[in-house]
Amino acid sequence: MESTEWHAERMRMPAAGWLATAVTAVVAAGLSNFGDLRWWRVSISVVILVAPLVGAWWLGRLPVRVVERGGEVWLHVDDAKLPMSAVERVEALDPVAYSDALGVALHPLAFVVQRPWIRRGVRIVLNDPEDPTPYWVVSSRNPERLREALAARAPAETV
C-alpha cells in the first residue's frame, strides 16, 4: 500500500535540555560513589550517568506525522493513529492557549502527548460518537504547519 507523508517532526529536546541533563547526570554519578572505586560502586555510577541520557533520548524520539495511506489521511503520534474522518476541527494553540489546554481546562478523557520543552501544540476535536475521547492535545514546534497539513487533507467540513 502506497503512502505519502505530508508532515513530520520529532519532539527532540533542545541543546540546553541536553546540557542540563548531562551536567545533572555527571554530578549525580560523581556523588554516588564519593571516590570509592570498588567495581559495584563504579557500576552504579555508570548506570546513574547513562540512565538520564537514555531517558532524555527516549522522550525526544517521539514522532508526529501526517500520512495519507489508501486514500485516507491519518495523524500518527508515536504509536497512536487518528483518521481524519474522525476529526471535527483542528486548532493551532499559541503558548497561552496551549498552557490553558493542559491546565484546568483539560478534559479528563482527553488524549494528551506533550513534552515540557515544547510550548505550543494543536487541539484536535473529534466527532466520533463511538470514542469517549473528546479531543487530542499534541505538542508541536510548528502547530500552524501541522494544522495546515491536517486541514488541507481533511474532509471539507473539517477545519
Image (tube, helix red, strand yellow):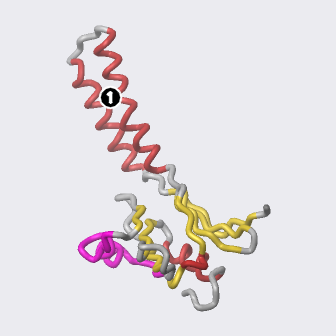
**Residue 72 point in image, percent of width and height:** 69, 74
> Which of the pair 130/113 is nearer the observer?
130
Residue at screen point 64% across, 82% down: 152
Left/right placement of residue 146 relative to residue 37 reads: right
**Residue 22 point in image, percent of width and height:** 36, 37
Q: Quadrant of residue 53?
A: top left
Which residue position is annotated with label 1? 48
Residue at screen point 46% across, 50% down: 60
- Check disc 1: other Cα within 10 Å, few if <14, some if 14-19, many if 20+: some
Residue at screen point 41% across, 44% down: 56
**Residue 91 point in image, percent of width and height:** 46, 81
104 is higher (above) or lower (below) than 47 = below
Q: In the displayed orientation, state which residue is furthest to the bottom.
A: 157
Q: Quadrant of the C terminus?
A: bottom right
126 is higher (above) or lower (below) than 21 = below
Check if residue 92 falls in the magenta segment: yes
Three-letter amino acid code of the residue under disc 1: Ile
40 is higher (above) or lower (below) than 79 = above
Left/right placement of residue 158 relative to residue 46 reads: right
Q: Quadrant of the N terminus?
A: bottom right
Which residues are drawn in magenta?
Answer: 90-108
> Which of the pair 74/13 is nearer the observer?
74
Q: In the displayed orientation, state which residue is furthest to the right.
A: 1
**Residue 140 point in image, percent of width and height:** 47, 67
Check if residue 11 falls in the magenta segment: no
SS at mark 1?
helix
Residue at screen point 70% across, 70% down: 68
* Figure label count: 1
